[in-house]
Amino acid sequence: MVTRLNSQASESSDISIRTVGLSKNYGTTQALVDCDLEVPTGRFMALVGPNGAGKSTLLLMLIGLLKPTTGHILIAGLEPRQHRREVLNAVGFVAQDRPLYQALTVRETLEMGSKLNDTWDGEGMIARMEKLSIGLDTQVRRLSGGQQAQVSLSLALGKRPALLILDEPMASLDPLARHHFLAEVVAAADERRLTVIMSSHIIAELGRVCNYVAILERGHLVACGSIGEVIESLGARNLADYDPLGHGMTDLEQVVLWHLSRST
Amino acid sequence: MIWLLIHLHRRVIWIWLALAAVMAAIVTALWLDTVSTQAAVVACMTRVTSSSNPSLAACSPAGGDALVWFTTVNHRIQWALIAVPLLMGVFMAAPLMGRELENRTHRLVWTQGITPMQWFASNLASILMFCFALTAVLLVAAGLWLSLASRITNDWAQFDLYPPVFLSYVAFAVSLGLAVATVVGRTVPAMAVTGLIWIAIRGATGILARPMLIPALVRRDMSAATAGRDWFLAPTYLDSSGHQMSEAQIDGLLQRWGGSGADPITLLQQHGIFMAGLYQPASRFWVFQSIETFIFVMLSVGCILVSIAWVRLRLTSE
């Protein structure tokens, strides 16, 4: 059962991620505007927003793969582009579309992780693959989408990161594969006390596991904080209107719907 | 990173190793066959070619047939070897980078403790080392053939196969393939563009620019200009004071003097205008090798700088 109660979140005051005045322009298009974000250590943050809201742009800047137009980023106190090596060691990242080398076997993919990273949990990742019944000598191209997602997650977890960033990792997965994937992320986050940022369109499932939320809309960060804080800032009476049929929406779903409906 | 590249491209590596081995074996076999079975003809043709008044009649009847055979084989070997750098750029370098960007696997590597610059440098160094190693194998075999060809034909005819320029062509093809793929970001278009640019630049330098790298010398004796180890470029005309005349000037003079039905050459000679030959002397051979090598090394450096700039400024800042 994929559950993570909000009360289980770490109350640590340490800040894992901090951005100040972060902006990114693509030519004349503003992808992210003046974003001030703080994510405390140990939180499981859902990064949500419609297509083109700037989610991937923000995540790529957090790991140093994109250069901000203006503003600053600190990951565990380090600027990603100035301390690239240290930040890469501390961050596990699963990119959108979960790119993998299709010609390699699972074993070779994990070996690649051990060759390219300073630290690597080789035995742990092999055990993880065996637990998930993913053949180590199977070529990646022969794996299902769900299995490939698990291999991508292993590459991110194998380096023993303190921060896990997942950019739409469940896109194009079937419901069962999504469930398994999310369960693995939650288990790893609990076991390793990770800070997790996951962007996704699948808010219903995220709503059951995250305890922190950031909502992006047209490049603007419109809400950020624990679910409770965001609900409080909105007013509980407003939220009830967004589950009029009593579908048992999670708090996250209601918060996101409230914001999105307000903007349209 | 080297481990990853070897594992990712092991099939391509084996194919190229096999191709290089087969090619080297064929060239070596042809050299052995020519040296062993046609030694007498080769010796005769060598004497004839190096004489001041070459005449293959001296080697007839076998000399003529052997020369035709040798010329045909020589052309085929040259074209096959000249195509190698092009094939390396189109089928090795461009896909190496194009597939990474197309499949977005570069982002996988960039988040595995490898910085974009380390990634690019590893790709560049690995493919350059591999291509140079393959080229070295081919050049050993080509060297055997060249040792024979240079006795029978002019060194300038085999200019493209000498190690300095050949290695610079390889470096350029590889760095061009990487640069185009980095900028284009798609495999097949990158392969096509690499091929077109390489052919255009190689054609422009080999055919148009090379004869003019150093101003040609003029020799009044046409027969001497076309013989020996020098590179005969074109016939020209000299006036009585030894200045070169353009074809337009000659045509104008012939039209003015024409009408009498006299032979044009005789007519020109009567007015003190003589045919001469433009040529590059054999002593400039290695100077030309150095100049052309320098040009292609600089082009390679330019391509590498474009790639680095694109990785730094666009792929990580776009």
Image: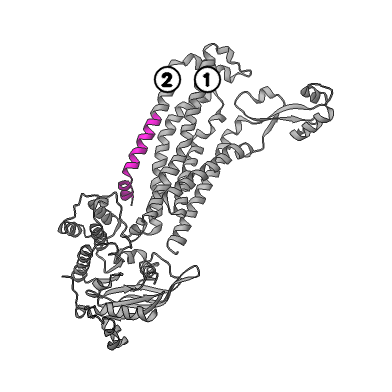
Instruction: Judge depth for marks 2 and 1 and give the one in front.
Output: 1
Query: Where residue B68 is drawn, which disc sits there?
Result: 1
State whether residue A262 is above or below residue B269: below
Q: At label 1, which amino acid type do we have?
A: Val
Q: How many marks?
A: 2
Labels 2 and 1: the sequence-earlier one: 2
From the viewer's perspective, tell me whether residue B22 is left or right of residue B75.
left
Badge 1 density bin: few <14, some 14–19, many ≥20, Cα 10 Å: few
From the viewer's perspective, tell me whether residue A42 is left or right of residue B281.
left
> Does the magenta stretch mainly form a helix, a strand or a loop?
helix
Q: Mark 2 falls within which chain?
A: B
The residue that appears at 46% across and 39% down in the rendered structure is B85
Q: Are marks 2 and 1 on the same chain?
A: yes
The residue that appears at 31% across and 50% down in the rendered structure is B4
**Residue B163, position as x, y percentages in the image:** 48, 36
Query: Where residue B33 is drawn, which disc sits there?
Result: 2
State whether residue B39 is above or below residue A165: above
**Residue B236, position as x, y percentages in the image:** 71, 30
Q: Mark 1 falls within which chain?
A: B
The residues bearing labels 2 and 1 have C-alpha atoms spaced at a distance of 15 Å
- Magenta-drawn stretch contains B12: yes
- Tell me the SS state at disc 2: helix
When asked about the image quadrant of residue B278, the answer is: top right
From the viewer's perspective, tell me whether residue B205 is left or right of residue A45.
right
**Residue A133, position as x, y percentages in the image:** 16, 56
When asked about the image quadrant of residue B57, the answer is: top right
State whether residue B178 is above or below residue B47: below
Question: Is any atom of residue A13 visible in this view?
Answer: no
Q: Tell me where the magenta segment starts and ends, as one range.
A: B1-24
Q: At label 2, which amino acid type do we have?
A: Asp
